[in-house]
Image (cartoon, rainbow, N blue to C red):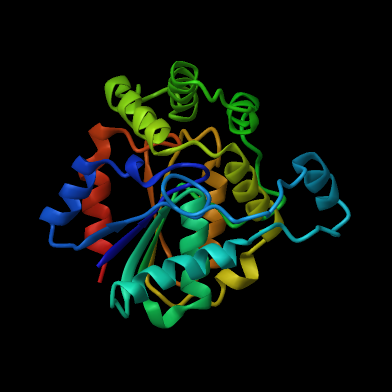
Amino acid sequence: ALLLIMGLGTQMVSWDDAFCRKLMHRGYYVIRFDNRDVGLSSRPANAGVPDLAALEQSLATGHIERPPYTLEDMAADGIGLLQGLGIQRANVAGISMGGMIGQVMASDFPQHVRSLTSIMSSTGRPDLPPPTPEALEVLLAPFPTDREGYIESFVRTYRIISGPVYPINETRVRRWAQLHFENGLNPDGVTRQLAAILYAGDRTDALHRITAPTLVLHGDADPLLSLACAHATVDAIPGARLKIIPGMGHVIPDVLWDLVADQMVAHAC
């Protein structure tokens, strides 16, 4: 089994069918799911919406109010899904926030994680380089809730975070945007997920506990989480191996799907 975990505010459909088939044809039972608060997954009732400006300001003081849920809660969701499917142990791969969730799964539930692939993710260490201003702007900007406005905003975001080397497949990205819209938008859920990331802070000590074989995949043109984030992750996880993909940004372009699938499968147990 290979459990795929998507990133902030992104639905499972962004693990494209064609990419999943590449993993399947390489011999793996592929599982993808919507994290809580996005897509077709449940939304917490009466959870409220964190004030991100206040949360970011509180980071400097170290007194951070607990958000409606945490990365640990989201990791427990993934474990619960595996248990619901009758799977005792799985290979786990996550992108960005999904990589963070996978890291927590591996550190807190080691008996359930055969291997970990952390893709374009980070440790939360505060001294790491921030996103580029343009990437940070699209990350934090409220997105339109009308169909056409949302799709155009989604495509613009992918253009920016993909970096300067590999252009996006706009037809494919527009299809993902349409599926996101049809499955249901939840701006408040994206805010709650971001609050969970910020609340987690520096997870380096927890990453020291990971015993699962770990592969860190990262592009050297990532405008959102720089390559320094990958090096920090490798340094934190005992025995972790780093694969740098030249030119890749914060998106896996379809021209690199075979390369990434081969890396994931060669690493998985």
Q: Where is residue 137, by image quadrant?
A: top right
Q: Residue drawn at (13%, 62%), measured in percent from left and top?
A: 27
Q: Residue drawn at (64%, 71%), measured in percent from left and top?
A: 205
Relative to residue 80, is residue 262 depicted above or below?
above
Q: Position of residue 44 (x, y in %)?
A: 59, 56
Q: Position of residue 64 (x, y in %)?
A: 81, 58
Q: Residue drawn at (22%, 43%), measured in percent from left and top?
A: 17
Where the N terminus falls, by quadrant?
bottom left
Q: Residue drawn at (41%, 43%), measured in percent from left and top?
A: 11
Does the rendering let one see residue 33?
Answer: yes
Relative to residue 191, is residue 240 depicted above or below?
below
Most extreme residue toward the right is: 61
Q: Position of residue 71 (x, y in %)?
A: 58, 61
Relative to residue 31, is residue 185 depicted above or below?
above
Quick one: 7 or 99, which is closer to the camera? 7
- Left or right: residue 46 versus residue 121 is right
Q: Where is residue 93, by image quadrant?
A: bottom left
Most extreme residue toward the front is: 45
- Left or right: residue 77 versus residue 127 is left
